[in-house]
Image (spheres, grey):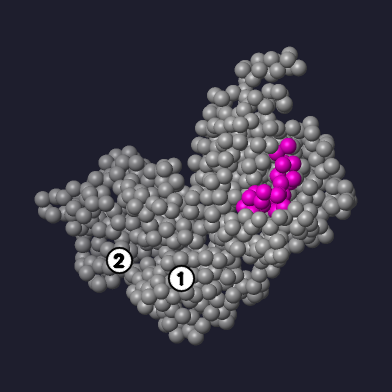
Amino acid sequence: MSEEPRVGVFICHCGVNIGGVVNVPEVTEYAKKLPHVTYAEHNLYTCSEAGLAAIKKAMEEYNLNRVVVASCTPRTHEPLFRATCKEAGLNPYLFEMANIREHCSWVHMHEPEKATEKAKDIIRMSVAKAALLEPQTEPEVEVKEASLVIGAGVAGMTAALSMANQGFKVYLIEKEKEPGGITEKLYKLYPTLADSSEVVEPLVKAVKSHKNIEFMTSTTLKDISGYVGNFNSILTGSEGEREINVGTIIVASGASNYTPPKGLYQYGVYDHVITQRELDEMVKKGEIGTPERIVMIQCVGSRKGEIRPSELEAFPKSDTAELLRKILKARKEEGWPYCSRICCMNAIKNAILVKEASPKTDVVILFGDLRVYKEYEDFYRRARDNEVRFVRHIEEVLPEITQTPEDKLQVMAYDALSGLEVNFLADWVVLSTPLIPNKDEIMLARMLKIPISTDGFLMEAHLKLRPVDTNVDGVFIAGTVSGPKDVSESIISGEAAAARASILMGNRKVRTDAITAVVDEDQCIGCGLCEEICPYGAPKIEDGKSKIREILCRGCGSCSAECPRRAITMRHFGDHQILAQVKALLIPESLKEVGV
Amino acid sequence: MVKDISEGEKRAAEEFEPMIAAFCCNWCSYAGADLAGTSRFEYPPNIRIIRIMCTGRMDPTLVLEALRMGADGVLIAGCHPGDCHYQKGNYIMEKRFDYIKKAVKSIGIEPERVRLEWVSASEGGKWAALVREMTEQIKNLGPSPFRLTHNPR
């Protein structure tokens, strides 16, 4: 580029997230003095409408041809700022991001001065790279109008139907013999007390009869290759292996129910200590009878302990099926740290069902915290109106269960209000247990290269901004595989994931990254090392020179580093651009030379 | 010049704050460092991250240049074996790493200043622990010889 770089730097306070640690005005003054910087300002939120408008205004006013935003991670916000540059007529690849939040203010919050100096370094490095950026164009790839949905629970079936109704071919696979997932095994659903079959059966009927859906039970994903628009997946089932080609994938493979270890609250010791699932089953079969009292205990196996670093390490590893099994077993003893969000409502639902079947039964719910959000408050009131008793106990001291000579269960707990011991004689003790991640889902995530969250569930690309996307382009998540959800939330996420996948398939084309390899044919000696090292077969030696087929190149840059003649340059990540960052960091006074 | 070096050494002995250049792959380690941030895992501010798409991209020259310019340590961080976004970039890097260590040694720098580590996108805790540990390690090694002669800060 012959044009002299005119860099604009926009530094974000991110409310107090950055501004509360880093001295943003000082950093802005510093940025103004950097070579090639024409303009610098700071904004409360650069990603807000006002912040984006400020970028556009400054671009026009100061004729900026490079933009640097110093804020959060490019992994979430780069697309937004690139789009803003594009709207203002600048090639989006002339944008660079300086990560001063995740990599600075959030990890150095007790060292504001050092964080401020580090932010200056990070911005200086970004400006140095920005000055050397070049415009790029993104190649297009075709998206196959077919989707693979993994898991035929409520979320998976909803997603499959939504896409099939839009005319896309859907392969729906289920590892069990029957569809329906966890919902199918429930009796009534909160807060309507509708039969679960009212939700599940129409879905099953629809997916089984839909002309665009190919439904396969007892089938799992064995292997996957390819990329967004063109995934090659190998399915394995009762009829052997089968290869299918799809443009998108929705993972809706669900979660597991926590079973308490033997002895926890005397579970597995006394027959009348059961889980909510088992109570559900009894109510369904009309076996509840007319007990005098039922005591429910909340948060059994949830909101307990914390995840250790060794576990976090084990989740993503490849050769750790055995290790995972052990960790999940240890977790069973200790419980999981998160709130499973459905157990409060589930207990209230079962309490109401018991009261309706046997109005004279005294139902006591022992809780530490009760979470009945949105309209569910009404459902909670309904339970109170039905004289269900809610007793807040001191959670840290586990209630003790003993058996009396009359074969009743005695539950001893500490009342949180009075601090006094309270005792209940009960016919049944019912444990409210969470939904938990399981080994199969973690292994599946590994195969698909989806990260695992600290709770062991599949992680969304961004908790707030991209809740059904994953970090893998073209792969989406729905239902409880990404964390506990109730039926309506699972349906919402199924619809959402289907909508996200349909956008790709509906456009038939998706633009992929412009970060690909380019060969300087004058330098190339046709040695073929690039051809040997590329995992995608992108380079090919023709007439003694390496030719790179852009559509096959995924932009890793292995060939560029391998080339003995340095004849291969990576777009957007060239040696000169990376070295400019290194030099700006280590020899700041040399910065004036950058770009010369 | 001799005076400069001895002053530099004196200052270094008093309050040596190492500067570590980290090359992180976009898909795992850069994201792991992001997660350390989102999780508010604190670590020493002695590291500066340079984003690359894959550790397979790491040209040995980049490491040598960073050291020549006075980095006290260089960290290359990528996806765990088997986890590479590009299938085998990290294996390619691992193969090159032996050579890099030899090259580093040949220019008179302790090979321990250069490290190759695997940090996944879900290992924010591991990233923070790694930076803590490596900062301590480089502090014990002292300032890079290149930093003292070439770039006393």
Which corner quadrant holds the C terminus of chain B? top right
Please tell me whether residue A34 is drawn above or below residue B122 in the rendered image.
Answer: above
Callout 1: residue from which chain? A
Q: Look at the image and say whether residue A572 sits in the magenta stretch.
A: yes
The one nearer the camera, A527 or A296, is: A527
Measured from the top left, where is residue A174 in percent x and y?
40, 72
Measured from the top left, where is residue B62 in percent x and y?
67, 41
The first of marks 1 and 2 along the sequence is: 1
Determine whether the residue tagged by mark 2 lies in a helix, strand or loop.
Answer: helix
Identify the residue at image location x=39%, y=60%: A440
Identify the residue at image location x=65%, y=37%: B64
The residue tagged 1 is: A234
Would residue A114 be found to the left or right of residue A424 on screen?
A: right
Judge the density around disc 1: few (<14), some (14-19), many (≥20) Cα neighbours within 10 Å: some
Q: Amino acid at mark 1?
A: Ile
Q: Look at the image and say whether residue A473 sits in the magenta stretch.
A: no
Q: Amino acid at mark 2?
A: Asp
Q: In this rendering, does residue A22 appear at all?
A: no
Identify the residue at image location x=42%, y=48%: A314
Q: Are marks 1 and 2 on the same chain?
A: yes
Which corner quadrant holds the N terminus of chain B? top right
Which mark is in front, 1 or 2?
1
The residue tagged 2 is: A280
Residue A152 picture quarter: bottom left
Residue lying farthest left?
A405
Q: In this rendering, does residue B110 appear at all?
A: yes
Q: Range of the magenta residues? A: A556-583
Measured from the top left, where is residue A252 in percent x and y?
46, 66
Callout 2: residue from which chain? A
Residue A144 picture quarter: bottom right
Q: CA distance from mark 1 to mark 2?
A: 38 Å
